[in-house]
Image: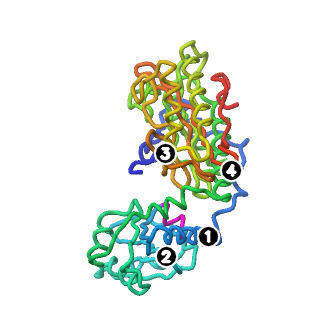
Amino acid sequence: MLVTKRELLGGAVTGLSLLAVPSILRAAEPDLSALNDIAAGTAPIGAEERRARIARAQGLMKANGIGAVLIEPGSSLIYFTGVRWGRSERLTAAVLPVEGDPCIVTPFFEEPSVRQTLGVPAEVRVWQEDEDPLAVVAGFLKDRKLAARPIGIEETLRYFAVNGLARALPGAKLVSANPAVRGCRMIKTAPEIALMQAATDVTIAAYRWTYPRIEKGMKPADIGALMNAATRKLGGDPEFALVLIGEAAAYPHGSRAPQVVADGQVVLMDCGCTVQGYQSDVSRTFVFGTANAEQRKVWDHVREGQATAFAAAKLGAAAGSVDDAVRRRYEALGYGPRYKLPGLSHRTGHGIGLDGHEPVNLVHGEATPLAAGMCFSDEPGLYLPGKFGVRLEDCFHMTPAGPKWFSQPPTTIDAPFG
């Protein structure tokens, strides 16, 4: 994903003034004494789990004729090696060979820092400032006798690294690493599911604490500050807190127009956090005060759309068929057709795990069959430009018996958090 929710919503709760109204001061320093860390007992992903991931990837590499995979810093590097590092013009990367331990390639002066989060046995090869890091990668591949075999490129690898590897290994066959990397990451294990459940539990608890503290006159930043403060106290690391009020809720990722809580206004919240790196993503829509007939009708239709998606998520079904089922139902209710407004202008859901948005998506045309261990958001919102929008979002994971919710969807606009 090129733009994350965190990036999109950056600054949403910044710039609070010391001269702000009392509600903002309470949002900035709320009384959190009633909240406790509910994520304290979660276990981080350990070395044994990461070794098993590498073994699964190597099996998939063999099955797909891939000799090695090149991975830059990001969630895939964390997934396989534990290394937490940022991307810069100085390449740090992992080479995952089809057999044996991986290799970490990094600048000489960064090696001690990189080793601090390395969570699996690995060779570390360094390069100096006047050397070509891709030549070091090529040297490892030659030493392992893998240079003549197809080399998998993880899908977020930057062009300069791909191009540099092609120069360092003329004639090398560079292929997509998706069969191995996606093949592992799309299927979550029990420890991953447990961390995603913990993150969701934190988000739901933060919502329940925040909801009764929303006051007339509050702005989105005030509400977001409350939500983030509660999330931290409950043991999560806030990832995003999108709050849309009134007409702004008709635009899925918001509006820069001024927004203030008022009687009869829709409030749409889309919030998530991480626990041990794994993400939650939950949306709720409610009305401050009393909902009118149209707001109730649209809310009920979205609740129906969410249930339709969940029912369509059957093992072996194409991921895109879930989106198709929702659009058929919405079109029967008079929305759309397809992505037209008023209606559902975005996909029904996205994959989720270490990244808030990761492959594959619940979107028309996606042929990947649903399998146990896959995790998705279920968020078929309805948007009425010039009026308001409604989004209900809960994530689920596929089990051998079918889909299972991480958070239970609400059943009425009058009790959005149960």
Q: Position of residue 412 (x, y in %)?
A: 66, 23
Lower sequence index among marks 1 and 3: 1
- Can you give x and y, in whole percent of width and height, for residue 194 in the image? 68, 54
The crowd level at tag 3 (other Cα within 10 Å; few <14, some 14-19, many 20+) is many
Nearest to the observer: residue 199 or residue 265: 199
Left or right? Give the position of 365 relative to 309.
left
> Of the residues under marks 1 and 4, which one precedes in the sequence?
1
Q: What residue appears at the point 63 percent right and 31 percent down from the top-left corner?
A: 211
Residue placed under numbered mark 1 in the picture: 52
The residue range painted magenta reads 75-81
Q: Is residue 344 left or right of residue 48?
A: left
Viewer-side label of 1, 4: 4
Residue in the image at 39% along x and 60% along y: 156
Mark 4 to mark 3 CA distance (whole Å): 20 Å
- Which secondary structure, mark 4? loop
Q: What is the secondary structure assignment of the residue under circle 3?
A: strand
Figure quadrant of residue 25:
top right
Label 2: element kind:
loop
Disc 4 marks which residue? 400
